[in-house]
Amino acid sequence: MAVDMKKYLGDFIAANSLFEKNENLVLPEVTVSPDLIKVMMINEVSPKNPADDFYAVGAPDYMATTKMLFQSAGIEIETAADLLALGIYVTNAVKTPKTEYAIETKTIMNHVPILEKEFELFPNLKAVMLMGDVAKKSFNAIVKKKTKKPVIPSGSTYKLRKEKYYYGDIRVFPSYIMTGGNILIEKSKVVMVAEDLKEMEALL
């Protein structure tokens, strides 16, 4: 059964009084078939302009860098719809835009229940990709509720990438932020993300 993600998450947020109505939440404006999703990609934070989010119409900024990274891995995509057709669902760990350069741990934790609700929707996941430290903190918090320990240990991402991590049967990839202008100039990170995407593609 197809699920309207904006309504699904919005209803959950309202039922649990997680945020005030006037908070600037940016929820995924997309309908998905949960059984078909094999990979969940978790980005850092929602954009200041909802028109730049992954599922926005037109040419959103978030898809510009995402497209570049996938194409660097030899995976031809143009839109978020192409990702969904491959069985890849992409979302933001923190669903309100940044107000400062760094995102406070309290803010990350406030959004964890929403991310957990998304994660629990997909019964056939083969991989979760954690695109940056905020995604790693968020998903570790979800896992620790069940196992009392994080799935990804602390440490530098370039070192962590040398190991394979699993939550049950789900492969968990620690990787780098997939949005923003910095990724375009950090060529070494582009190479590493492309390598992670190739490994992920083999699981589809």
Image (spheres, rainbow, N blue to C red):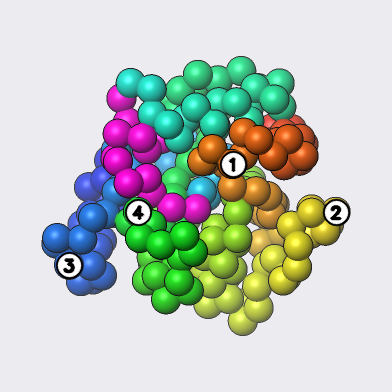
Q: Which one is earlier in the sequence, the residue at label 3 or at label 1?
A: 3
Residue located at (43% from left, 41% from top): 34
Classify 78 as above or below 61: above
Residue located at (54% from left, 31% from top): 65
- Residue on which disc 3 sits: 20
Dot 1 amino acid type: Asn
Q: Which one is earlier in the sequence, the residue at label 2 or at label 4?
A: 4
Dot 2 amino acid type: Lys
Cα gap from disc 2 to disc 1, whole angstroms: 23 Å
Q: Residue furthest left?
A: 21
The local crowd at label 1, few if under 14, some if 14 to 19, many if 20 or more residues have their Cα within 10 Å, is few
Examine the rendering and report whether any part of residue 7 can be seen.
Answer: yes
Classify 108 as above or below 54: below
User: Looking at the rendering, which quadrant does residue 6 occupy?
Assistant: top left
- Residue on which disc 4 sits: 97
Q: Residue 127 appears at what percent x and percent y?
A: 64, 47
- Mark in front: 4 vs 1: 1
- Mark in front: 2 vs 1: 1
Say left or right for 89 vs 137: left
Q: Residue 181 appears at what percent x and percent y?
A: 54, 38
Residue located at (49% from left, 64% from top): 102
Q: Which one is earlier in the sequence, the residue at label 2 or at label 1?
A: 2
Question: Dots 3 and 1: beta carbons under 8 Å?
Answer: no
Dot 3 amino acid type: Glu
Dot 4 amino acid type: Pro
Question: Dots 2 and 3: beta carbons under 8 Å?
Answer: no
- Residue on which disc 2 sits: 162
Say left or right for 38 vs 200: left
Say left or right for 146 vs 202: left
